[in-house]
């Protein structure tokens, strides 16, 4: 009887401990959920404060930041609050030079860019408008419902696009987080495949395909009696510039109609001065 009583007490204690553990887990879950909800609500409030319309104050008439504006500015600088531009209340609280400094900070440290190498046979043209590029992207990537949803998200995340008139398409995003979601993504532009890579994501000395395609390159013909090593040596001697790579299109077989030449790729994006 004594053993039975002790067993029952042990089982009851275990059940109570199990119940307490489940209760504690539920309490923690509810607390975390409430905290997440509170944080989201607070960020939404700071977002509203930072994007509202404010009068422009001349420097002698500037007012002090409110406590909420101070909180919003701290969240923005700390990258917890994502904005397309610096907080709009700065037009009433900061000098023109301070606003310019924050705008510079925004462009250099908040926004993030993706670049893609555009094949020459896309023929975008030097003066194509940004809206035309966007229309071309939409047309090439919305052939089904999944593509339409994907393109809608891409347009929502992107801030603006620029084309250098040669072969580099740049898309700017409001934050690094937004840009990272599209890093290494493939799109189609006028029937050609383009790959977007995040600018600055690579370590020093490492070039993504899109970045490498921007390097200055030239073709060398009539080199039957000169090997690749000698070509690099000659190019570096003549140009006083570093050659990053040399390639032989003939390695691709007869897919290219004219493939009897070397492609010399320099380490920089501009033509060496001595050329």
Image (cartoon, rainbow, N blue to C red):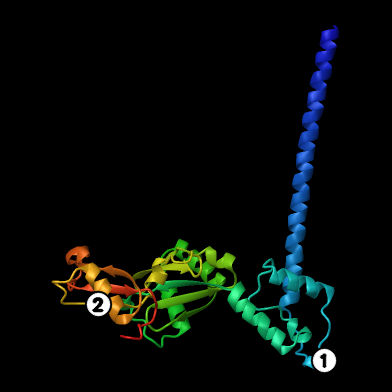
> Residue under circle 1?
61
Q: Residue at x 31, y 81 (%)?
A: 239
Left or right of 248, for residue 170: right
Mark 2 or mark 1, earlier in chain: 1
Q: CA distance from mark 2 to mark 1?
A: 62 Å
> Residue under circle 2?
219
Residue 255 picture quarter = bottom left
Instruction: Indicate the quadrant containing the N terminus: top left, top right, bottom left or bottom right.
Output: top right
Q: Does the rendering let one see residue 74?
A: yes
Residue 158 picture quarter = bottom right
Badge 2 crowding class, 10 Å Cα cut-off, few under 14, some 14 to 19, many 20 or more, is few
Can you tell which mark lies on residue 243?
none
Q: Position of residue 211 (x, y in %)?
A: 42, 71
Q: Does the rendering let one see residue 53?
A: no
Left or right of 174, for residue 258: left
Q: Is residue 227 above or below residue 97?
A: above
């Amino acid at each position: 009887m004594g053993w039975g009583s002790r067993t029952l007490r042990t089982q009851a204690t275990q059940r109570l401990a199990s119940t307490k553990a489940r209760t504690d887990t539920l309490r923690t879950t509810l607390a975390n959920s409430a905290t997440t909800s509170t944080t989201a609500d607070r960020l939404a409030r700071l977002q509203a404060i930072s994007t509202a319309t404010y009068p422009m104050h001349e420097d002698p008439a500037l007012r002090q930041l409110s406590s909420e504006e101070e909180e919003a500015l701290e969240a923005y600088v700390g990258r917890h609050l994502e904005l397309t531009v610096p907080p709009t209340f700065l037009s009433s609280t900061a000098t023109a030079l301070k606003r310019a400094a924050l705008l510079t900070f925004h462009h250099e440290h908040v926004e993030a860019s993706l670049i893609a190498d555009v094949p020459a046979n896309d023929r975008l043209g030097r003066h194509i408008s940004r809206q035309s590029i966007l229309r071309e992207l939409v047309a090439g990537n919305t052939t089904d419902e999944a593509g339409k949803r994907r393109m809608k998200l891409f347009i929502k995340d992107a801030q603006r696009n620029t084309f250098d008139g040669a072969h580099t398409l740049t898309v700017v995003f409001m934050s690094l987080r937004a840009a990272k979601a599209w890093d290494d993504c493939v799109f189609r532009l006028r029937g050609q495949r383009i790959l977007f890579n995040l600018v600055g994501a690579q370590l020093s000395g490492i070039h993504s395909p899109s970045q490498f395609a921007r390097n200055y390159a030239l073709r060398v013909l009539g080199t039957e009696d000169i090997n690749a090593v000698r070509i690099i040596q000659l190019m570096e001697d003549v140009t006083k510039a570093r050659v990053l790579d040399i390639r032989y299109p003939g390695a691709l077989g007869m897919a290219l109609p004219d493939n009897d030449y070397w492609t010399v790729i320099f380490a920089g994006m501009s033509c060496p001065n001595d050329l």
